[in-house]
Amino acid sequence: MTVRAEPPRDHAGMEVLGYEECLRLAASEPVGRIAFAEGGDIHIFPVNHRVVDGLVAFCTADGTKLAAATEGSIVAFEVDRYDAASRTGWSVLIKGRAQLADESTVQARLATAGLRPWRKQLPRPEWVVILPDVVTGRRL
């Protein structure tokens, strides 16, 4: 007799997603939100991104996102999808440190990831990567 294990659930009954599934889902959506504290305030910005070798990566220009990366700030990155008709969805939260992708091998891998800024009015020459410390996800 085969007993099928139920997926783990949280206190609200939502399915808890594993690490690999979280990264796969985060990679499946083109836009996520980066959140960080700066100057006594909380900032949350939508960014188009890629997940490459377990790192979340996005391009940016001079400003608060780049400052957070150069300071090695702790950040949160969230990606989710929700279908109102079926009342299903998922949410992935990645917490870690932001840093500039200054190693040439990392930059080369990111350059082939196909990420292009949506708005071209402002050049976004800097790659920022998030080094995950905690990756969690839930499925509704």
Image (tube, rainbow, N blue to C red):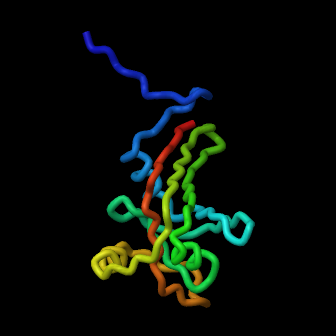
Q: Viewed as shown, does residue 13 lie left or right of 18?
A: right
Q: Residue at x 38, y 80 (%)?
A: 102
Q: Residue at x 54, y 74 (%)?
A: 71
**Residue 64 at what x, y percent from top left?**
63, 77
Q: Viewed as shown, does residue 74 lie left or right of 106?
A: right
Q: Residue at x 45, y 78 (%)?
A: 127
Q: How many marks?
A: 0
**Residue 105 at what x, y percent from top left?**
28, 78
Quadrant of the rendered structure where residue 115 is?
Answer: bottom left
Quadrant of the rendered structure where residue 113 is?
Answer: bottom left
- Outermost residue to the right: 41
> Relative to 36, does residue 15 appear above or below in the rendering?
above
> Relative to 111, does residue 82 appear above or below in the rendering?
above
- Outermost residue to the top: 1
Q: Quadrant of the N terminus?
A: top left
Q: Quadrant of the C terminus?
A: top right
Q: Viewed as shown, does residue 120 lie left or right of 127?
A: right
Taking depth in this image into account, of 12 and 62 the one nearest to the observer is 62
**Residue 84 at what x, y percent from top left?**
66, 43
Q: Viewed as shown, does residue 8 lie left or right of 122?
A: left
Q: Residue at x 50, y 32 (%)?
A: 15
> Relative to 29, does residue 108 appear above or below in the rendering?
below
> Relative to 72, does residue 138 appear above or below in the rendering?
above
